[in-house]
Image (spheres, rainbow, N blue to C red):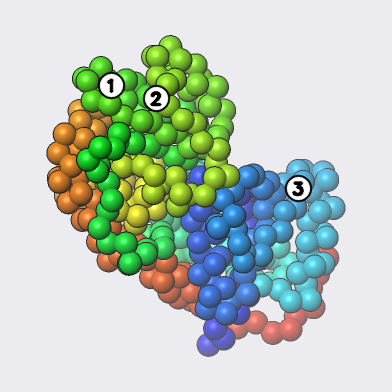
Amino acid sequence: MSEPVERILLLTHELSFRGASIHALRLAKGLESRQIETVVLCTQRHSLDSTLTNNVRIVNVPGYSVPVWGRVVRRTVLQNLSAQPPDVIHVLGPRLLPQALWLGRLLERPVVLGLTDQGEAGQVALPAPNDICRAIVCVSESVRSALPAQLESIEQRVILPGVPLDVTHRTPPILKDGHIPVVGMAGPLEVIKGGSFFLRACHRVLQAGVPIRIVVTGSGPEERNLRRLSTSLELDEHVTFVDDGTSMEAYLSAIDIFCLPSLQQGFGVIMLEAMALGRPAIASGVGGVLSVLEDNKTGLIVPPSDSRALADRMLELLNDPERAREIAIAGQNLVEDRFTVDRMVDETITLYNDAAPVVSDASYRSE
């Protein structure tokens, strides 16, 4: 029987302001709180809220995934890990899966593949025969269902993300009298995240005569286009673009209604963070969102790419603050019941212990 795991290596391509990275950092902190030594190795580190990265051991290794230079870097990583190898290598996403399998083979340690996106899940390929990747863990059933059929022989589990919940703040202070409501979205600014539909929906709300302030938090390749769209819709005096290094709790607390207008979504971790703070969520009915929100109860669901429907649902809440607060409290209760960090960490540790074999002090081979 395996000994309980004591050391975990979390391997990820990048740490940036997106749900997958926030999920990884929450997991790393949770493992450390259980006295499991955890290191996050990434190839790119972008600006992030320091409250997410505090007390997390992060090693930034640029070039780790580069074909030629990466071979030199990988040998260095191997040498550093050989003295005290991790019990499990948890690779987040398929991009660094080849490197994780290489490390796992040489260190004689199991690899767990974590997936947060349907598109990534559909592209996963493992070499045959596979004796290193012991399990695939997905953030939602929609992500798991996107896995290729040839991976059915590998253990597959759905472990829902977890977010912190401050139980001392149970009454959402939203949509107060004498306060201009704030509607916001947050995450990487990419086309697939639906920022243009969000801005167009906000424009419709203003045209309906309902004053709002608009917050767009994040950065990415779509930021310039969104700023141009804001100007063309004459929204500039209403919109604030917030840098993704700003305290996440601060800007989520500053909004009244959180929107997730994605065209495709593995889950919606930032949405959970907003719900935990007592903010009602309006989200596109795609992917893992449908496993979180129950329409008209714990949130509001809209069709993707439909700015008119999104505007209508914003107006429903803006015109009925009491209903908005009821939905916010229901969403907060849902997070407390199903999406805690403790539950996520417990289930992940169980997976690690199931995947970890009995290992001896082996002699590690070099490439």
**Residue 92 relative to residue 285: left or right:** right
**In the rendered structure, are the residues bearing label 3 and label 2 in contact, judged by CB atoms less than 8 Å apart?**
no
The residue nearer to you, when weighing 4 against 343, is 343
Q: Amino acid at mark 2?
A: His
Pick the residue in front: 28 or 236.
Answer: 236
Tell me the distance, in whole angstroms, between the alpha carbons under discs 3 and 1: 45 Å
The residue at the point 64 percent across, 61 percent down is 40
Measured in 3D between alpha carbons, the distance from the residue under mark 3 to the one under mark 2, in whole angstroms, is 39 Å
On screen, residue 172 versus residue 356, left or right, reads left
Q: Quadrant of residue 36?
A: bottom right
Q: Is residue 318 above or below residue 149?
A: above
Q: Position of residue 216 (x, y in %)?
A: 45, 33
Q: How would you rate the neighbour count of disc 1 (Cα within 10 Å): few for under 14, some for 14-19, many for 20 or more?
A: some
Q: Which residue is mark 3?
A: 62
Three-letter amino acid code of the residue under disc 3: Pro
Residue 110 visible within the image: yes
Looking at this view, name the residue that lies furthest to the front: 178
Work out whether 288 lies above or below 357.
above
Helix or strand or loop: what does disc 3 sit on?
A: loop
- Disc sitting over residue 206 in the figure: 1
Labels 3 and 1 touching (C-beta < 8 A):
no
**Separation of disc 1 and disc 2 at Cα?**
9 Å
Q: Decide which of 4, 184 is in the foreground and name it.
A: 184
Q: Position of residue 280 (x, y in %)?
A: 27, 46
Label 3 vs label 2, nearer the camera:
2
Measured as percent of width and height from the top left, residue 25 is found at: 55, 59
Q: Residues within 10 Å of mark 2 (few under 14, many from 20)?
A: some
Q: Which residue is mark 2?
A: 238
Towards the viewer: 315 or 162: 315
